[in-house]
Image (cartoon, rainbow, N blue to C red):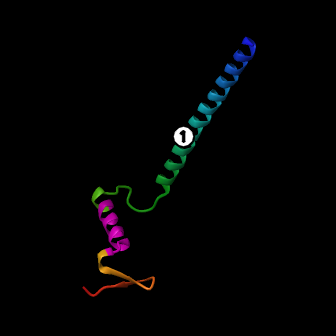
Amino acid sequence: MLVQVNEEKEQQKNIVSAAIEDRVQAELDLAGHIQAITMHTSGSSEKKTKDIRNNRKKEVLKNHRNIAGEVIKDGRTIKSNS
């Protein structure tokens, strides 16, 4: 019985060790992919925070629905005139 417990513990250690190695390798691969992408992107390498905020505002406005200004009639959305 004690031998089986020790074997199970050894197998568990091996599984955990393999999982840790896989995770570390995946993190290294991801870092390499990110580095490759950043090296090959076109345009300015320095993006200003202000530009990112402005782009986000534009996208929000583009995708925004004015729920209060819309009326649903017969399953269709109709913009109200008010």
The local crowd at label 1, few if under 14, some if 14 to 19, many if 20 or more residues have their Cα within 10 Å, is few
The residue sitting at 52% across, 51% down in the picture is 36
Magenta-highlighted residues: 52-67
**43 drawn magenta:** no
- Quadrant that contains the C terminus: bottom left
- Seen from the viewer's position, the closer of residues 69 and 12 is 69
- Quadrant that contains the N terminus: top right
| Residue farthest to the front, as pictured | 74
Q: Which residue is mark 1?
A: 27
**Left or right: 65 with respect to 30?**
left
Image quadrant of residue 11?
top right
Image coordinates for residue 24, horizontal then vertical, percent: 56, 35
| Residue farthest to the top, as pictured | 2
The residue sitting at 36% across, 68% down in the picture is 59
Image quadrant of residue 81?
bottom left
Main SS category, magenta section: helix
Mark 1: which amino acid? Glu
Q: Is the residue 15 above or below the residue 38 in the image? A: above
